[in-house]
Amino acid sequence: MISVGVKHSWKPIEFVSEQKKFRGITMDYLYKLEPVLGVKFDMFNIDEISTKDADILSSVSNPKVIDTSKYLLTRPILNFPYAIYVHKDNQNIERMEDLDGKKVAVFGRGQLVNLLTQNYQKINLSKIDIIEEAFNDIDVKKSDAYIGNEMVVDYEANLQGISFLRKIGYAPIDTELTMAVRNDWPIMLSILNKSLIALEPEKNKILSNWNLSQFKKTSIFAFISASLFVLLVGVTLFRAYILKRTLKAQASEARELIWYQAHYDMQTDLPNRMMFNMQLAKKSKLALKNNTLIGLLYIDLDSFKEVNDHHGHSIGDMLITQVAARLKNCVSDSDWIYRLGGDEFAILLADFGALGNIEKTANTILKSLSAPFHINDLAISITSSIGSSVYPTDTTNIKVLIKNADMAMYAAKRLGKNRFQQFEKSMEESASRKVAISKDLKKAIGNHEFRLFYQPIIDLKSNQIVKAEALIRWQHPDKGLIGPGEFIEIAEETNMIPQIGDWVFKQALEDVLTLKQAIHPDFSISLNVSPKQLGANCLIAQWPKLLQEHRIPIDSIGIEITEGVLLDHNKITAKIFNDLRNTGAQFLIDDFGTGYSSLSYLKKLDVDFIKIDKSFVQNLSRHSEDMVLCEAIMVMAHKLGLKVVAEGIETNEQRELLLTMGCDYGQGFLFAKPKPIDEILSEYQGVSKRNVA
């Protein structure tokens, strides 16, 4: 008996059927190998049991996720090309090069998304969790294209009867599928490799079994053959009639199963995105005819990614199942709940009466989902953000209705999460403005329209300029100088922030040498780093190398990060930060006091400075609550060997109070507003040797 770890939902490669049987291409190989090798394979779902319990892993498409100290890889079983799919009406995309600047759907947890992010930075990637989500995004024109495993996509498209897809070609990326064997079984590895070679002539036959059109041909052929045999052997007409009825019943059951798999989510048993689109179209026409309303709720879990990252996808899957169960208890029998994909749900509310009842239902959901979920031995707490739109009050176009609810949901997230937001017309105007800014941003990167301004940081004891914070500005060709508040959030949402942040870093490397020479040899520049700049294959990983190449003196560059970055501290960011630290970069915690402010997070990174948020400084006065908080922060920081920078200083009184508390550095309009480097040089050249007050 040899244990084999199998993925439960990767059609047609391998999956667990409705009858709880292990099926798929890799299973066909293993079932053929059993009698040849004289063994019995004991299959189990690796999403439910750890891979360490498996003697063999039946499918490995990304060797990087396998612990090579425990497993050895076999020779390739299959080669997977990644095909490019567009809507059949889209005639503007005919090859890979046409995807630049386009929104392209891609599975968010495989190696493909990392390769595309690394090698095709001009493509705007939209990460999806399930293939139905990609089909829907192409159908409603939310995405311009989809890049996916050709075998998987073609199978699912045939299975679900998708007719609007057009395959235009292939991405210059492919992957191989292998098996993995315990590393203490080298003989088994050799046997498997030889067996796979022996089965090579049967490869096409195995693959043809998983072509849906072949299923149909086989079924018809089997039926005709059976009928001829019955006639030839003289079986009675009655038995032929019974056989015909049986075959019809089996065909009907097969059609029902295929339909169910195409329209329902297997994990939650809720209707999926395809069913949602179909029913919304029908219900909207009926509502228009009967002069009634439909309420659409869009629900997104606020912390689901953290649950997956910290506890694993199996816990995440169980959480989704429990969320679905709670949602069912929050609505009436006449309402419909859908799982759109990942952690997104939708609810269609019928006969809800007054508009206030929509908000009442939403608040019931918020309260229900905020209660802890008990999974295994864990108590997991999450929140949700809900947006709504009403048909036909807000719009008579169902695609716009969906977009409106989606905009409202994201507005709820921006307002602090764990809340409900009704669609408002102003959101549409805001969305249009964002689209326009997004288009201009793409041009701005290529046209070098960004500028760096610097705000001086003063040593409060000596009144000397010792540092400056780099702050980006956008010199728009038509709108003039634009501040970061107008475009940084959009740059983060559209994944342009890594390129912009990389430009800021390279420009700062040039400017810091000039400022050190003109003002003081110990002068340094601090740069703000967004969490969106961190991750696998990120540009910031190249910064340590650039620091070394430019021969930047030690302590010349500071990296400003928020407490949220420390909260998400992982192996990738740890390596990046360690590499930067080894080249002499300093670290500053920005907006300290507004986030988690926990010593446990400060321990994770060797921090040099903390910056007290300006909200504590603006209302600073003797015996005030802010005074107590600032003093407490400074005592804690100095005990830990950290320096303190106070932001937003605007009056001499604030400066004097901070100085009496022992604050090290100050920044704010009292000293200077952010200025271009030329103005900094003309105003502050040699200023470190004299009083700036």
Image (cartoon, helix red, strand yellow):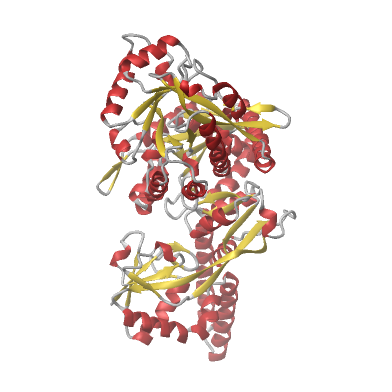
Q: Residue furthest bottom?
A: 233
- Counting the numbered discs, the total is 0
Q: Nearer the viewer, residue 371 or 567?
A: 567
Is 395 positioned to the left or the right of 233 in the image? Answer: right
Q: Nearer the viewer, residue 184 or 324?
A: 184
Residue 418 horizontal/vertical position (percent): 42, 31
Whether residue 289 appears in this view of the structure is no
Task: Decide which of 69, 197 is in the foreground and name it.
Answer: 69
Toward the viewer: 323 or 127? 127
Residue at 29 percent across and 31 percent down: it is 641
Location of residue 548 in the rendering, given as x and y in whole percent from the top left corner: 48, 48
Q: Residue at x 37, y 29 (%)?
A: 610
Residue 79 visible in the shown view: yes
Vertical side of 97 occupied by 400: above or below: above
x, y percent for residue 312:
35, 52
Q: Is residue 177 above or below residue 549?
A: below
Counting from the top left corner in percent of width and height, residue 675 is at: 58, 25
